[in-house]
Image: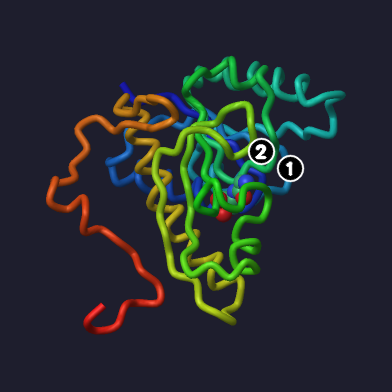
Amino acid sequence: MSLPIAVLISGGGSNLQSIIEKMEDNILDVDIRMVLSNKADAYGLKRAEAYGIPTSVLNHKDFGSREEFDAEMVRVLKEAGVEAVVMAGFMRIITPVFLNAFPGKIINIHPAILPSFPGVDGQSEAAEYGVQLAGCTVHFVNEKMDNGAVIIQAAVPAYPGEKEDDLRERILKQEHRILPQAIQWLAKERLTIENRFVKLAEADVAAAERDVFSLVNPPLEKGF
Ligand code: GAR
């Protein structure tokens, strides 16, 4: 049976699109029961509608507290039969009310290599800092912002003086790869957390490959 999930968004929904496309390719075994946005004008809602996926809008400003907002999200998602939650560009901090409703089943995509650059604009902060490698992270969600156990990360090069949008786009391309992959691992119950370390069952990394993997930027020159 496919895992019944919700995707939470606040904006464009390109990550949502990447999930839908992997479902269409039959390599991602989930059923999106609900796309929920806290913004009525989020373009991601249109993407969902185009595929006949149910949508729901809850404006956080209509609620007296974070907890009340979360309780309503839980009600809507439970009613739709949701068992796991993917935060894909959802720009709200959730409370234990939400966390406790889906224990161990909430994941988030963040556009930086955590724990560097948590918060709302990881890409700009990485560019301003002058990192040579930037990237993205999919992690389990816990009670602290951008702090839960890390499932998968991708690194990309950053170039001095480049337009911030170019870096953003380079990171986003990798988000579209690692988020659907992480969801599939979750759906197949291949992830366990041991002391913050996420173990992937049946991981296919040959022992010989473990020590040679690296992304170096700028590239090393001959002889180094
Ligand atoms: C993505 O870059 C995602 O990593 C980021 O918002 C963007 C949403 O794009 N999320 C955060 O910054 C969370 N702190 P999308 O709506 O096109 O998927």
153 vs 130, nearest the viewer: 130
**Residue 198: x %, y % from top left:** 37, 32
Task: Say few, some or many: other residues with alpha carbon within 10 Å of mark 2 (under 14 / 14 to 19 / 20 or more).
Answer: many
Which is closer to the viewer, label 2 or label 1? 2
Give above or below for 134 relative to 136: below
Q: Do the residues labelled 2 and 1 touch (CB within 8 Å)?
A: yes
Note whether ligand 1 is within 8 Å of mark 2.
Answer: no
SS class, disc 1: loop
Residue 211 position by quadrant: bottom left
Q: Can residue 210 be seen in this view?
A: yes
Is 82 displayed left or right of 74 in the figure? left
Furthest residue in direction front, as rendered: 224
All told, the count of numbered labels is 2
Residue at image point 39% right, 32% down: 197
- The residue at the point 64 percent across, 64 percent down is 124
- From the top left corner, tell me how far across and down residue 77 is, in percent: 59, 21
**x then y, percent, for residue 63:** 83, 26
What amino acid type should be assigned to the residue bearing mark 1? Ala
At mark 2, the secondary structure is strand
Residue named by callout 2: 37
- For label 1, the residue is 40
**Quarter of the figure that contains the N terminus:** top left
